[in-house]
Image: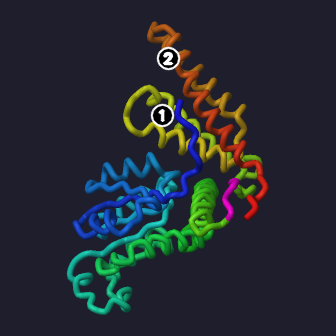
Amino acid sequence: MREFEPLHSYFLIGGLILHDQLREALETRLDKHTYEIHTDTAVNSFLEWVGQNRHRVDCLVLGFSTDLSQFLEHLKSRDILLPVLLVQHGAIAEAADQATQQSWQVSSSCQTLASGYHDKVICIVQADLVQLDNYIQQAISQFLTLPYSQSTERAIAPLTETKTSFTLSLQQQRLAEKLRERLGYFGVYYKRDPRNFVRNLSPEQRTALFDQLRKDYRVLVLSYFKDDGHLNDRIDSLVNTAFFADISVSKVVEMHMDLMETFAKQLKLEGRSEEILLDYRLTLIDVIAHLCEMYRRSIPRERPEG
């Protein structure tokens, strides 16, 4: 089992690197004590990483390309809404002489691509990378102002809309907590939004939440004994979702038992022993231990004096 860790106050940044200037900026202009950075040059592998870390990523910094439209559309179709900073490279960016007047040089194609994902994506040019930290914080702050429903131009099925609203609300709350910690607010205990508690969700939202949790838990179980480098991320993602939705430990146990029953039936059909399933009790214990620790820390404590 892992050591207990506090809720990370650093910001996890995912960078899709399409030019060296962006890589250099991410590596040299961001404080390593404030940011953890993951970079990639390939869209497909980066998309996989974002999907695996959807509940941990705090901002995406993307080198602008018209090919990004499919990438952003895929994220949106999976209800993965994140703060995004688009960095435009090329002739328009290189022509930037006036450090105080950069925004007007962002091309209309960059702005159109940005608005297709959500209304609060920030577009900058290469010369703006000198203020990368400020723009990342701006992208996060703008993201927190997104309304839960953006379906102003086309009808969206009620189930899709409620699921999107819920996941956006969770993401915004998690980021708000990190901002409060960074700005020096008193962060001894976690503050959660009761509107996101499972008991206060609509039936459609509850169904979508538990379906996603079951899928995530299945992936966690199947990868628990593999050294693939993603185990901690998967546990963090699952536990954070359960905590902010105020899901009970008994529900996690129920989810585990249902999955083990499914696996047992499959092993029986294949004529294999079910004893291997006993090992996965460690997975359940690990998840429960970390979830209980988060609930323990959520109990308000007195503010330290001085």
Q: Of residues 131 and 214, which is closer to you in this image?
A: 131
Between circles 2 and 1, the one closer to the viewer is 1
Secondary element at image label 2: helix
41 versus 91 height, above or below: above
Q: Main secondary structure of the magenta part?
A: loop
Residue 135 picture quarter: bottom left
| Residue 222 part of the magenta-drawn span | no
Q: Of residues 237 and 121, which is closer to you in this image?
A: 237
Earlier residue among tags 2 and 1: 1
Residue 230 drawn at (x, y percent): 42, 39
**Magenta residues, start to end:** 186-190
Q: Residues within 10 Å of mark 1 (few under 14, many from 20)?
A: few
Q: Of residues 162 and 187, which is closer to you in this image?
A: 187
The residue located at (52%, 51%) in the rendering is 55
Q: Is residue 290 left or right of residue 19?
A: right
101 versus 118 height, above or below: below
Q: Amino acid at mark 2?
A: Gln
CA distance separating discs 2 and 1:
16 Å
Quick check: marks 2 and 1 in contact, CB under 8 Å?
Answer: no
The residue located at (47%, 29%) in the rendering is 224
Residue 41 drawn at (x, y percent): 26, 56
156 versus 237 height, above or below: below
Residue 253 picture quarter: top right
The residue located at (72%, 50%) in the rendering is 197
Residue 287 drawn at (x, y percent): 59, 34
> Label 1, on which residue?
219
257 versus 121 height, above or below: above
